[in-house]
Image: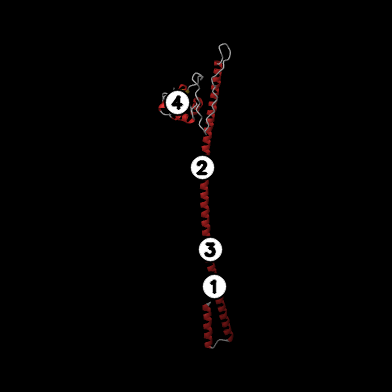
């Protein structure tokens, strides 16, 4: 546009100098020059508008880049939090599974102890019934009359609890105790020794943990039971295989 305008000006000047330009052509040249000026102004305005749009687009691009980076950071934070929560949940689940296994094992142990205690109580009841029958037979006089009985009847011994050890069972006076079953200390469980021998739970556990015994005297030699306790139970125990 600028070159056209310059060309028009030069042409007008040349014609004016030559003196051969008519009024009509002079007006046309002026009109063309004004048109070129208008187009030039329009073109400059469009260029300025385009430059403003470019600047706006650049600003928007920077804004979008910043927003994209912020969204990316937020996504990473959410993923990290999700992974952390997942790891925590998995750890808690594993702890609960281990706890369930422990409780199941404890339940099996308690059930086994319950069955052992129940079996021992049945054995004790049978022994008590046999002792009572023998005492009843011994109390009968030869003439068929009943003599007063001074022999105490052993009462059932409760199973040991986990909270307190079972008390030691006193030994009846010599001559009044009915024959009792012999307990093999190499085979009997601690609960059986508590029930049948009247030992404490701790002492019965020590006897079990120090097995086997070749002779009964090893109970004292190994400091498993005191001499006084051994003297009380030595006639009711055995170490036979």
Q: Which residue is mark 2?
A: 95
State the separation of the CA atoms marked 1 and 3: 23 Å
Residue that badge 3 annotates: 63
Mark 2–mark 1 CB contact (< 8 Å): no
From the top left corner, tell me how far across and down residue 205 is, in percent: 47, 30
Query: What is the CA distance from the residue labelled 4 to the residue labelled 2?
Result: 49 Å
Residue 80 vertical placement versus 30 (above, below) = above
> Real-space Cα distance between discs 2 and 1?
70 Å
Q: Earlier in the sequence, mark 3 or mark 4?
A: 3
Q: Which residue is mark 1?
A: 48
Measuring 54% from the left and 84% from the top, which residue is drawn there? 12
Mark 1 or 3 closer to N-term? Answer: 1
User: Which of the two discs, 4 and 2, labels the residue nearer the N terminus?
Assistant: 2
Residue 132 in sight? yes
Q: Is residue 63 above or below residue 15?
A: above
Give the labeled residue for mark 4. 228
Q: Secondary structure at mark 1?
A: helix
Task: Give the residue at the far top of this rendering.
Answer: 143
Eye-nearest disc, 3 or 4: 4
Crowd tier of the residue under label 4, counting other residues whose Cα lies within 10 Å: few below 14, some 14–19, many 20 or above: few
Quick one: 3 or 19, which is closer to the camera? 3
């Amino acid at each position: 546009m600028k070159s056209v305008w310059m060309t028009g000006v030069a042409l007008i000047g040349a014609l004016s100098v030559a003196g051969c330009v008519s009024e009509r052509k002079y007006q046309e040249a002026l009109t063309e020059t004004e048109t070129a000026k208008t187009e030039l102004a329009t073109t400059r305005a469009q260029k300025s508008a385009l430059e403003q749009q470019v600047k706006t687009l650049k600003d928007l691009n920077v804004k979008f880049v910043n927003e994209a980076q912020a969204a990316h950071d937020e996504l990473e934070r959410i993923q990290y939090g999700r992974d952390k929560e997942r790891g925590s949940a998995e750890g808690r689940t594993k702890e609960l599974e281990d706890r369930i296994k422990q409780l199941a094992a404890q339940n099996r142990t308690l059930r086994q102890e319950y069955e052992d205690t129940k079996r021992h109580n049945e054995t004790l009841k049978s022994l008590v019934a046999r002792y009572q029958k023998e005492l009843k037979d011994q109390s009968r006089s030869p003439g068929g009359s009943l003599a007063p009985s001074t022999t105490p009847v052993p009462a059932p011994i409760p199973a040991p609890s986990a909270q307190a050890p079972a008390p030691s069972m006193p030994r009846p006076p010599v001559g009044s105790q009915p024959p009792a079953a012999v307990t093999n200390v190499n085979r009997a469980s601690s609960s059986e020794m508590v029930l049948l021998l009247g030992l404490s739970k701790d002492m019965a556990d020590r006897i079990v943990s120090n097995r086997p015994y070749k002779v009964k005297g090893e109970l004292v030699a190994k400091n498993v039971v005191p001499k006084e306790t051994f003297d009380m139970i030595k006639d009711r125990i055995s170490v036979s295989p």
